Image (cartoon, rainbow, N blue to C red):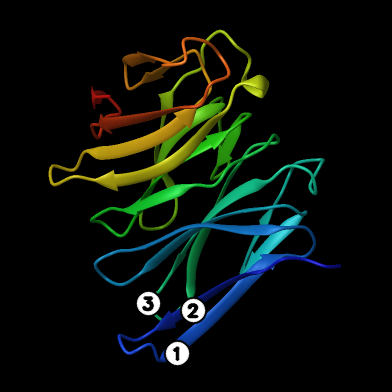
Amino acid sequence: GETEDIFMAKADSDGNFLWGFSFGSEVGSNISGDIVTNSDDEIFVSTIWTGSSIVIGTFTEENPDAQVLANYDRLIAKFSSDGTPIWTSREGSVEEDFITELVADDAGGVISVAASQGEITINESNFDMSGTFLSAKNFEGGSASVTQISTASAYIDLISHRYPIGIARDGSGNLIVMITSTDESVDIGGITLANSGGDFGTYDIFLASIASDGTGNWA
């Protein structure tokens, strides 16, 4: 069937093509998210996709959602500097999942900020974390840690909206995270912030510094 694939390409400093790589699900949509590199020129990419499965090189990830063409699933993949897939990690729920923002760490892994509307599954482990969360991957692609960084107000998850905007690391190793939310208030690492609109339904942007243990430094 018809599908939208994702295409990656690398060029040298003069713009000369070095290599290309494409991947996607067998049917449905594939939407590219973030792409970052580490000090070894290894590449991390994030994507959301619909369909029963997605193939990246020799790796296949299955979508357990019964509505495989309705709800987006989320995935992170690591590539070598020459474009060879190293590992893939599905980070989806059986509800809607959203684009993941990435930052590489100093040990060959990657840290992501993401959002889901249901219980997420990462490396065959389940986490009841609808909302926005941090996920740290080790070198092998396993889940090193999963930390919820924003919790909902009294409104149910399906009518409130929280999306990641960006993530970075400062010189001390703290994470700088930006998210947007329609919740009346949001708790980020133990720091509670009210929506400036004063009520549910207005999109606000929240910026926070989060320590390695998930504690908020400021927001």
Query: In 3D space, how far apart are the residues under numbered discs 2 and 1 (Cα atoms)?
Result: 7 Å
Which amino acid lies under the numbered mark 3 shown in the image of this protein? Answer: Ser
User: Does the image show residue 57?
Assistant: no
Q: Going by the picture, which residue comes out furthest to the left?
A: 172
Query: In 3D space, how far apart are the residues under numbered discs 2 and 3 (Cα atoms)?
Result: 11 Å
Q: Position of residue 103 (x, y in %)?
A: 34, 52
Q: Circle 3 — which element? A: loop
Query: In 3D space, how far apart are the residues under numbered discs 3 and 1 (Cα atoms)?
Result: 14 Å
Q: Residue at x 52, y 82 (%)?
A: 20
Which amino acid lies under the numbered mark 1 shown in the image of this protein? Answer: Phe
Q: Position of residue 42 (x, y in %)?
A: 35, 69
Q: Which mark is residue 9?
A: 2
Q: Circle 1 — which element? A: strand
- In the image, residue 86 sits, relative to residue 155, either above or below, namely below
Q: Residue at x 26, y 30 (%)?
A: 213
Which amino acid lies under the numbered mark 2 shown in the image of this protein? Answer: Ala
> Mark 2 against mark 3, which lies toward the viewer?
2
- In the image, residue 195 sits, relative to residue 88, either above or below, namely above
| Among the two numbered marks 3 and 1 on one chain, the one whose residue lies closer to the N terminus | 1
Q: Position of residue 154 (x, y in %)?
A: 56, 7
Tag 2 near tag 1, CB within 8 Å: yes
Q: Which residue bears the numbered disc 1?
A: 17
Q: Is residue 104 left or right of residue 68?
A: left
Q: Which mark is residue 81?
A: 3
Q: Residue at x 51, y 35 (%)?
A: 163
Q: Which mark is residue 130?
A: none
Q: Nearer the viewer, residue 138 or 212?
A: 212
Q: Position of residue 196 (x, y in %)?
A: 41, 16
